[in-house]
Image (cartoon, helix red, strand yellow):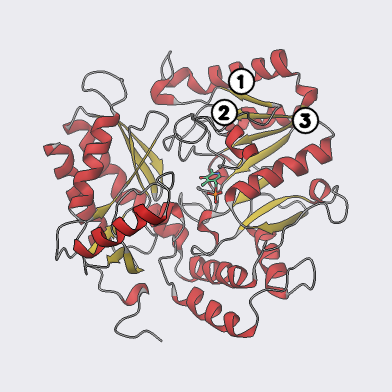
Amino acid sequence: MSTATSGGPSLPQERRLVTEIPGPRSRELFARKQSAVPPGIGTTLPVFVTQAGGGVVVDADGNSLIDFGSGIAVTSVGNAAPHVVERVRRQVGEFTHTCFMVTPYESYVRVCEKLNAITPGDHEKRTFLVNSGAEAVENAVKVARHATGRQAVVVFDHGYHGRTLLTMSLTAKNMPYKHRFGPFAPEVYRVPLAYPFRWPTGPENCAEEAAAQAIDMINKQIGAENVAAVVIEPIAGEGGFIVPARGFLPRVLEFCRANGIVFVADEVQTGFARTGAMFACEDEGIVPDIITTAKGIAGGLPLAAVTGRAELLDAVHVGGLGGTYGGNPLACEAALGVLETIEEEDLVARASRIGELMLPRLHALRERYPVVGDVRGRGAMTAIELVVPGTREPNPAAAAEIAKRCHAEGLVVLTAGTYGNVLRFLPPLVIPEHLIDEGLTILEKAIESH
Ligand SMILES: *Cc1c(COP(=O)(O)O)cnc(C)c1O
């Protein structure tokens, strides 16, 4: 199947720099990008990719970069993973679209059956498919409002849920996501998140105090009986890989259960083996009423899903949900290929192993370099938060500078965080261990010399 020029896992698993980064060919393409594409579509690292697979991306100048980004937690099974490639190739020659709402096909139903089976909880579930994470979150809110007859939606500090009007309104951070894009959707309320590193009275009290504050705000400012849904990421992604203090999520869930509020877990970034469990909710035994998934679901083909309690999803009238492309047949085949790959290669365990390799080395960096204020994450979703040494003051300049140095050395890393001061690491779960090692060495040198 693979030829000398194809991407995927057959690509040499090595860092190889043959030009400066970006090289001349990428610079030429970037100049064309700047005249054809608006600057609102930003660029983290201006190398133009020609192939990718395993733990590397190869650019137009022949450089091979170590991938600690997975296209933002998307290519968890690796780029051009064999099961994905085979299934999509076969499907593209059969048919590419009928619209599932016009004349359905089996692969869509199969993906839904699988998601109903593997998401947390053994209650009766339903799933429907859409095109993006934002669309999934927006639909989860539609379902929760319809099923409860209530309007308010509660979200959290540092939350990120997308860029459409509703999901931008659910998102916490102004710049770059919301700035001058208002007015925002109504009936969205934001409450504190249990952010251990920045909790004013310290991490020990964080879970209890944050939950108490959030619940008090809901009761006093909205009225629990007016709340349709609480929407929360089990680990805040764009907000800075914030793992809520243990006990916070169960307390919020308990409050939702007691008040007839739909608990929506936004696992768009944390899903599909990324955190060392199939879903991040499993860590504290959280069983959400609705779970939204996207990024890791289909190897990069556009697909997202809303999975939830049958009685909630079945409440919506016939024709009330959907979209022209939702559950495209190529994307459904890709998702089935992803699920086969996760199972066959035991990528849940691989994600845990990646965490075991990375976290001790990241903690060692924190001991050695006072610019590293916090280390956190689970499995193959880890991060460091950078501070002004000796303080907890956010240091976005250091994050930008260190990321730039990593990029120049051929390591793809991403930044994140409300304060822009977090470096996050999301390698494909199939990355060879020697590349993790080499990537961390590059990171350490970049921190040392920044
Ligand atoms: C990326 C992301 C989204 C939005 O997904 P898109 O596919 O970019 O629309 C929503 N929620 C979370 C937690 C995300 O990380």
Residue 381 x/y as whole percent: 41, 47
Q: Secondary structure at mark 3?
A: loop
Residue linked to disc 3: 151
Work out how far the residue at label 2 is from the one at label 1, CA to CA, in angstroms: 9 Å
Q: Residues within 10 Å of mark 3 (few under 14, many from 20)?
A: some
In front here: 404 or 357?
A: 404
Mark 1 to mark 3 CA distance (whole Å)? 18 Å
What residue do we see at 38% from left, 59% from top? Answer: 428
Residue, disc 1: 214
Q: Amino acid at mark 2?
A: Phe
> Which callout, 1 or 3, points at the residue further toward the start of the chain?
3
Residue 307, position in %: x, y?
69, 52
Residue linked to disc 2: 156
Q: Secondary structure at mark 2?
A: strand
Image coordinates for residue 450, horizontal then vertical, percent: 15, 36
Relative placement, left or right, of 292 versus 149 is: left
Callout in the foreground (1, 3):
3
Identify the residue at the far right of this view: 317
Q: In screen coordinates, is 1 left or right of 157?
A: left
Vertically, is 252 above or below 324?
A: above
Question: Is there CB contact under 8 Å for labels 2 and 1?
Answer: yes
The earlier-in-sequence mark between 3 and 2 is: 3
Res. 76 image quadrant: bottom left
Specify the amino acid type for callout 3.
Gln
Along the line of sight, which residue is nearer the eye, 426 or 48? Answer: 48
Q: Toward the viewer: 68 or 131?
A: 131
**In this view, the mark in front (2 or 1):** 2
- Which amino acid does the dot numbered 1 rest on? Ala
Looking at the image, is mark 2 or mark 1 earlier in the sequence? 2
- Give residue 312's position: percent from left, percent from top: 80, 45
Q: Is residue 54 above or below residue 231?
A: below
